[in-house]
């Protein structure tokens, strides 16, 4: 049997599903994908952080996201047959599907340890593993579990992977070259030590198998793991994370740094097939056929090969690299927006985020913030006093006047010409000519001032390190400290005042503070998280959002008294938030993350008012398209939804949605990267309602 896995770990939390956030960059998503498995030549699944699951029905040509009700970080997946499968993840999470992955039922496992490895030998008998030598076994399909862990002293090692060839016989691998073998269903284990490498992954077909790990270690067995023979890697010093075979001859190993090794003779020799430039870390690989193979990894990377790994197509669409973080975002209007980030990266959309394009930047310095001063002019700021300007809606950029030599963190717009910038070393700068020149307004100390807000030309606030809050009544010429009640040591990253009395600040350790007297005193609110919070936005005295580390988006409907975590399907740190029209919102963050919602600030009552009156399928946009397009549809009530794409011969080429969804307006992104130009049809079916529309792919 095949047992596949790769491991990492994050946080699981209770989530709110009423507000929907969808990925816009990268596509299909930006989470690290940890495990992939093909069930047959067409059906496949991969799992990722933050509860992200994707299915394919065409051999990996296209993938569709599964709507889930959990945000556990998912580390392993295995299917017993076409319909029955299991996944495992953070904090002891295990779930089961009996309909091919469309829906998942969480199971209960004793303990809260992260679960890295998973191996089921039937629909009833299976094993999961994690740190500290923890191995749990079920004999009733996951209803109950018994610990069968490896005894001390070697039991302290993490068990990264399990592979069972029968209900009783299997291996477990971990650190320091340790390979454990059991022939009695985990009651006892025999240890074999092979070198010192940390072994991450295994692949078995009957008694033949492979394990791979650090230092380019490749080990081969023909007797079910009793003895092992080393194989020679084509490149030394690589960390190998996944291995799979399509048949007796064709195999692929993937690893960190985009490493890909392949064999065409059953592992006798391995060839270096690593793509150039690097695609980033790869964590697992799986064959759909003897020649069709997909690999997944860092930042949502999905690679596909149709020649057994000789050449690869990157299916991920992104205006950024996985190493780049977007720190700031702003929109001129509902369709035109700009985001900026590390290495001077500038990305721009002219169609409300359907596509984002990389824009030439005049600098390579990190850019922290961007603001539209009017319908044409934007400014962006960053390290080493860098300022850049655009006078054509962000299409082109040029350097502006330098604002000192320190780091510039945030921009507060005052007028079409005037803006203030908060910076390192307690400095505030001002421009009165759209960023052509900048003047310092004095220093408030040595702390970094991470955010700044101006209520009008005179009244404003800036916040930063060491619990710093400052207030001005003369346009920044003078500042007064107003931090009574702010917990000592808190770094404040964001400030927003609704008026001259009610305001909020957010920062480290999940801390949110509120004032109702203009900042004279502050009260600590209960956020329910310890994640660093980077940006807060309050629409009014009741409804607000705050974003931060680990894909955190919190919402309040009662002025901050209570906060609820929203489902984002995002693991990455979120840095900035832009909301307008009370409906549309965007967040940006690490690994080029851009997410969008179209019901950002609606209250529960308002969401009811915005429930569509009937079913509808809209025309895709853009159309014609290349290679992605967005399909919108609306549901008047919670419904089972199927959205599929067909070619002109009536062959299904993609399943975009196959899940039960709530009432409201929904979007699905279709990626036709691997399809040829031509006419395609998309079909929505929910209950008795069926609608079909035509779209044109032009490459």
Image: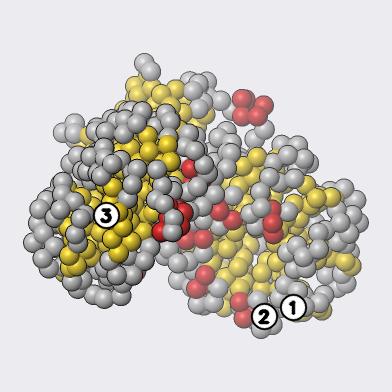
Name the residue at the top extreme: 688
Of circles 2 and 3, the one toward us is: 3
- Do the residues bearing badges 3 and 1 touch, measured as CB atoms within 8 Å? no
How far is disc 2 from disc 3 in space, using C-alphas? 50 Å
Q: Say left or right for 686 vs 305.
A: right
Q: Which residue is mark 3?
A: 202
Query: Dot 2: few (<14), some (14–19), or many (≥20) neighbours within 10 Å?
Result: some
Whole-percent x and y of residue 287?
A: 20, 49
Left/right of residue 639 with respect to residue 429 in the rendered view = left
Instruction: Look at mark 1 in the image and give the residue it sits on.
Output: 425
Task: State the residue in front, 303 or 187.
Answer: 187
Q: Which mark is residue 406?
A: 2
Q: From the top left corner, tell me how far across and down residue 529 is, in percent.
A: 66, 48
- Name the one closer to the observer, 688 or 316: 316
Q: Residues within 10 Å of mark 1 (few under 14, many from 20)?
A: some
Mark 2 touching mark 3, by CB under 8 A? no
Q: Mark 3: few, some, or many residues within 10 Å (few <14, many ≥20)?
A: many
């Amino acid at each position: 049997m095949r047992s596949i896995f790769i491991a990492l770990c994050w946080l699981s939390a209770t989530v709110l599903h009423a507000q929907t956030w969808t990925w816009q960059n990268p596509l299909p998503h930006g989470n690290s994908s940890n495990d992939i498995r093909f069930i047959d030549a067409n059906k496949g699944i991969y799992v990722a952080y933050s509860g992200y699951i994707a299915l394919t029905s065409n051999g990996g040509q296209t993938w569709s996201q599964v709507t889930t009700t959990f945000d556990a970080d998912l580390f392993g997946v295995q299917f017993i047959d076409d319909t029955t499968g299991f996944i495992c993840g953070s904090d002891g999470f295990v779930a089961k599907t009996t309909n091919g992955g469309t829906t998942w039922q969480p199971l209960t496992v004793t303990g809260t340890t992260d679960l890295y490895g998973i191996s089921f030998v039937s629909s009833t008998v299976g094993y999961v593993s994690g740190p500290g030598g923890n191995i749990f076994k079920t004999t009733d399909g996951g209803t109950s579990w018994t610990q069968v862990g490896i005894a001390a002293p070697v039991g302290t090692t993490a068990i990264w992977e399990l592979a069972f060839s029968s209900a009783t016989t299997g291996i477990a691998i971990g650190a320091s070259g340790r390979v454990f073998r059991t022939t009695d269903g985990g009651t006892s284990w025999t240890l074999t030590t092979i070198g010192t490498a940390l072994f991450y992954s295994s692949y078995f077909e009957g008694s033949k198998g492979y394990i791979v790990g650090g230092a380019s270690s490749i080990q081969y067995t023909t007797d079910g793991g009793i003895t092992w023979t080393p194989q020679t890697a084509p490149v030394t010093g690589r960390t190998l994370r996944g291995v799979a075979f399509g048949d007796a001859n064709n195999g692929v190993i993937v690893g960190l740094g985009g490493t890909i090794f392949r064999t065409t003779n059953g592992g006798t020799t391995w060839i270096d097939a690593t793509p150039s430039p690097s695609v980033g870390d790869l964590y697992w690989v799986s064959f759909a056929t003897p020649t069709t193979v997909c690999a997944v990894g860092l930042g949502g990377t999905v690679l596909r090969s149709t020649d057994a790994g000789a050449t690869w197509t990157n299916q991920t669409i992104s205006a950024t690299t996985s190493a780049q973080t977007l720190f700031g975002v702003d929109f001129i209007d509902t369709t035109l927006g700009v985001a900026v980030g590390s290495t001077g990266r500038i990305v721009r959309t002219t169609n409300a985020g359907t596509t984002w394009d990389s824009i030439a930047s005049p600098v390579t310095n990190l850019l922290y913030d961007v603001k539209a001063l009017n319908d044409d002019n934007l400014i962006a700021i960053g390290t080493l006093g860098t300022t850049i300007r655009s006078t054509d809606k962000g299409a082109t950029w040029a350097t502006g006047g330098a604002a000192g030599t320190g780091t510039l963190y945030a921009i507060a717009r005052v007028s079409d010409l005037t803006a203030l910038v908060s910076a390192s070393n307690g400095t505030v700068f001002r421009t009165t000519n759209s960023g052509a020149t900048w003047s310092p307004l004095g220093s408030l100390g040595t702390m970094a001032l991470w955010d700044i807000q101006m209520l009008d030309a005179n009244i404003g606030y800036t916040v930063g390190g060491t619990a710093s809050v400052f207030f001005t009544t003369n346009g920044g010429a003078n500042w007064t400290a107003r931090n009574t009640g702010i917990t000592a040591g808190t770094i404040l990253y964001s400030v927003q005042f609704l008026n001259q009395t009610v305001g909020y600040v957010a920062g480290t350790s999940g801390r949110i503070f509120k004032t109702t007297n203009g900042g004279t005193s502050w009260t600590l609110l209960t956020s329910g998280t310890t994640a660093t919070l980077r940006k807060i936005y309050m629409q009014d005295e009741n409804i607000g959002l705050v974003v931060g580390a680990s894909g955190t988006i919190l919402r309040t409907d009662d002025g901050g008294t209570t906060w609820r975590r929203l489902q984002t399907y995002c693991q990455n740190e979120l840095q900035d938030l832009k909301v307008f029209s009370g409906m549309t919102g965007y967040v940006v963050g690490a690994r080029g993350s851009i997410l969008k919602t179209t019901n950002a600030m609606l209250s529960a009552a308002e969401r009811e008012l915005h429930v569509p009156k009937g079913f509808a399928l809209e025309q895709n946009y853009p159309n014609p398209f290349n290679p992605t397009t967005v399909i919108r549809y609306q549901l008047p009530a919670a419904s089972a939804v199927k959205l599929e794409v067909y070619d002109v011969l009536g062959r299904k080429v993609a399943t975009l949605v196959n899940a039960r969804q709530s009432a409201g307006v929904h979007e699905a992104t279709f990626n036709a990267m691997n399809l040829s130009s031509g006419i395609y049809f998309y079909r929505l079916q929910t209950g008795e309602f069926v609608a079909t529309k035509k779209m044109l792919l032009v490459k």
